[in-house]
Amino acid sequence: MDWVTSELSERNLYKLLVNTVLPRPIALVTTVDANGHANAAPFSFFNVFSHAPPLVVLGIEGRSPAESPLKDTMRNIRATGTFVVNLVDRALVEAMNVCAIDFPAEMDEFAAAGLTSLPSQQVAAPRIASSPVQLECRETVSLSLGTRNRNLVVGEIVHLHIRDGLVDDQFHVDVDGLDLVARLHGADWYTTTRDRFQVPRQTFDKWRSQQATQSIADTGEA
């Protein structure tokens, strides 16, 4: 089956993309407005884009009502130029789900979700204390895309926090200890990073040697 994307409805295209491009990491993004009011909201159109410079990318869809076209997250990033990506572990899922509620702007998501905030080291936005990884970011560039006030935000990571005990002296991270979760298909499905397998990366010389060995074996069988 195949489709021309421009001929699909927005809803059907969304269903195809979010049910095939997975698992998707979750950014529980914290921001603060010009008056110091903090906000927390999860996004799964998110990933690390580069390590040199260290960049993250967020896809933020706007609100539908014309009188409030931008989500609080995007409006706050425009106001302060900063945000924090808090990664979500299994213990944080329920609180993250509360933060996904479309609260009125005056609502305190931290209080509603039972989250404790911590001040960041280099940006105005607060961090979530219980998150195992917190990436303090400064907005590098934001692009407005298409309809529905969609925005693509690129942010530079200026400070990195990882829970004590999860990184050794060689900068090896205890992935099991992180216990991160990711979005799957549909509205309600998630997965953890504990079910995984290893495939060693090959060099060209090793691959060529294996091909030669296989060719000899195939010839012998013939």
Image (cartoon, grey):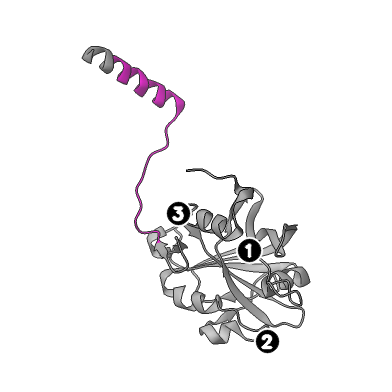
Q: Amino acid at mark 3?
A: His
Residue 65 relative to residue 43: left or right: right
The first of marks 3 and 2 along the sequence is 2
Relative height, residue 209 to residue 194 (above, below): above
Circle 1 SS class: strand
Circle 3 SS class: loop
The residue to which callout 3 is attached is 172
Q: Are marks 1 and 2 in contact (CB under 8 Å)?
A: no
Classify mark 2: residues with Cα within 10 Å, few (<14), some (14-19) or many (20+): few
- For the residue pair 181 and 8, the one nearer the viewer reads as 8
Residue 187 spot, x, y in % from top left: 47, 67
Circle 2 SS class: loop
Q: Amino acid at mark 2?
A: Glu
The residue to which callout 1 is attached is 159
The first of marks 3 and 1 along the sequence is 1
Residue 160 spot, x, y in % from top left: 59, 63
Q: CA distance from mark 3 to mark 1?
A: 18 Å
Task: Report the magenta residues as a range.
Answer: 192-216
Q: State yes or no: residue 204 in magenta.
A: yes
Residue 120 spot, x, y in % from top left: 64, 73
The image's mark for residue 106 is 2
Classify mark 1: residues with Cα within 10 Å, few (<14), some (14-19) or many (20+): some
Relative height, residue 123 to residue 23 (above, below): below
The image quarter in which residue 67 lies = bottom right
Q: Amino acid at mark 1?
A: His
Residue plotted at (34% across, 56% down): 195
Classify mark 3: residues with Cα within 10 Å, few (<14), some (14-19) or many (20+): few
Q: CA distance from mark 1 to mark 2?
A: 28 Å
> Can the viewer see residue 51?
no
